[in-house]
């Protein structure tokens, strides 16, 4: 008997519901082909609800999300809501309350997609960033004193516990062992690189580096370890992306380098990510924003949302279906689309979804 997965869908704002709809279309086609079932439940969390109720997220939301196997998100961001309210009130709150302590961001250039990096192609741009998602500067530790005066002091501290660092590194090592270049037949060693700033952030990243080395030596001797300062990482992501296999880093650096990586893989229209709790409920999303100016025009690129759906299936254990979606996306980008930007694909949003789903 086939397995059934219950999925919460938060379409969100702007074009979010449109791309989420295409992801659902492809997921249902893949599920039918690979003998499992998906049940979807829609939630209206987003800007319109906030404007009507003054509430970004009901207090019951996180508990309700825990009853699902996974969450598929469209996009959050409304032009009539001050920036930060929805992002903190919905995205960050769900991440923290559901303890989604891993942000997983593949940086993969699909065939036919343009990259701004000269002489690099899909063989060179294919790695993954594991970003710690629960600590660091983004937790809001700090505050103001004498706010609004010429003597104002603003403090926001990077705080990491051993527990936060160790569990992130554990996930990254396991992921490198499973997904690395050697596993895919394209390199001699599976490699995990730590991206930090040990020469300046001599407390927080000293902890990261010590645990990285100790864990690697004791538990993962077959995985090669590299270390990169974050500024050097940014340079090499542009100059030599083929050096990378799996990168692991803290919250702030991860936020920055993954957006750089997204541009090298062709832009936000193809970049997907997952907020993962390996022992709980995870949430998957396209990385681009809600793009409100394109709402309802059927021109937005849905491939990032579709790839987010594939990531969701992979995390749920439906690895064959996930790989099949990725293969379908690669065929569509390589043989069908004229471009990746909104209105420049040669097809509408729903047509692109159809092109991928038709592979099943």
Image (cartoon, grey):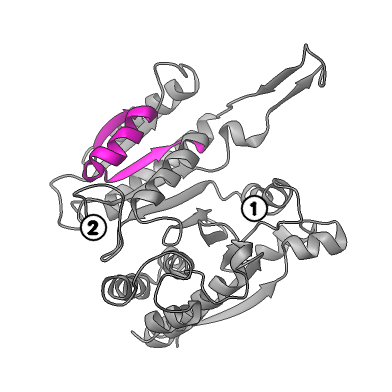
Placement of 153 over or under 124, stated as above or below: above
Q: Position of residue 103 (x, y in %)?
A: 49, 49
Which picture quadrant has residue 249? top left
Task: Residue 61 in the image: state x and y as whole percent.
Answer: 74, 61
Residues drawn in magenta: 223-251
Residue 217 appears in the picture as rendered: no
Q: Quadrant of residue 42?
A: bottom right
In the rendered image, the quadrant that contains the C terminus is bottom left
Write down the residue under mark 2.
122
Residue 125, visible in the rendered structure: yes
The residue to which callout 1 is attached is: 91
131 on left or right of 98? left
Residue shown at the point (49%, 56%) measured from the top left: 274
In the current view of this chain or complex, which residue is farthest to the top?
Answer: 151
Q: Which of the two discs, 1 and 2, labels the residue nearer the N terminus? A: 1
Q: Which image quarter holds the N terminus? A: bottom left
């Amino acid at each position: 008997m086939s397995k059934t997965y219950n999925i919460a869908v938060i379409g969100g704002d702007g074009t979010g519901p449109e791309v989420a709809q295409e992801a659902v279309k492809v997921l249902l086609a893949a599920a039918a082909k690979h003998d499992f079932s998906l049940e979807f439940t829609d939630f209206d969390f987003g800007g319109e609800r906030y404007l009507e109720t003054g509430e970004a997220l009901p207090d019951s939301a996180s508990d309700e999300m825990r009853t699902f196997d996974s969450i598929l998100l469209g996009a959050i961001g409304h032009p009539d809501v001050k920036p930060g309210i929805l992002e903190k009130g919905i995205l960050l709150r769900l991440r923290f309350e559901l303890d989604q302590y891993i942000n997983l961001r593949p940086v993969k250039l699909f065939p036919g997609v343009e990259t701004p990096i000269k002489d690099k192609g899909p063989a060179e741009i294919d790695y993954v960033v594991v970003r710690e998602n629960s600590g660091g500067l983004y937790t809001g530790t700090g505050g103001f004193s004498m706010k609004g005066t010429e003597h104002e002091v603003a403090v926001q501290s990077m705080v990491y516990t051993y527990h936060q660092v160790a569990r992130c590194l554990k996930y990254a090592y396991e992921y490198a062992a499973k997904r690395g270049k050697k596993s895919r037949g394209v390199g001699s060693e599976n490699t995990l690189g730590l991206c930090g700033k040990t020469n300046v952030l001599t407390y927080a990243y000293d902890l990261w580096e010590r645990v990285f080395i100790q864990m690697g030596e004791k538990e993962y001797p077959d995985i090669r370890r590299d270390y990169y300062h974050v500024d050097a990482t940014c340079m090499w992501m542009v100059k030599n992306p083929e050096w990378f296999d799996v990168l692991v880093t803290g919250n702030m650096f991860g936020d920055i380098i993954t957006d750089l990586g997204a541009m090298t893989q062709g832009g936000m229209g193809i970049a997907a990510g997952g907020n993962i709790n390996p022992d709980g409920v995870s949430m998957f999303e396209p990385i681009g924003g809600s793009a409100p100016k394109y709402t309802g025009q059927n021109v937005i690129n849905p491939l990032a949302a579709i790839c987010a759906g594939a990531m969701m299936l992979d995390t749920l254990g439906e690895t064959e279906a996930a790989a099949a979606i990725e293969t379908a996306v690669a065929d569509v980008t390589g043989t069908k689309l004229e471009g990746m930007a909104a209105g420049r694909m040669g097809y509408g949003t729903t047509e692109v979804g159809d092109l991928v789903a038709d592979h099943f």
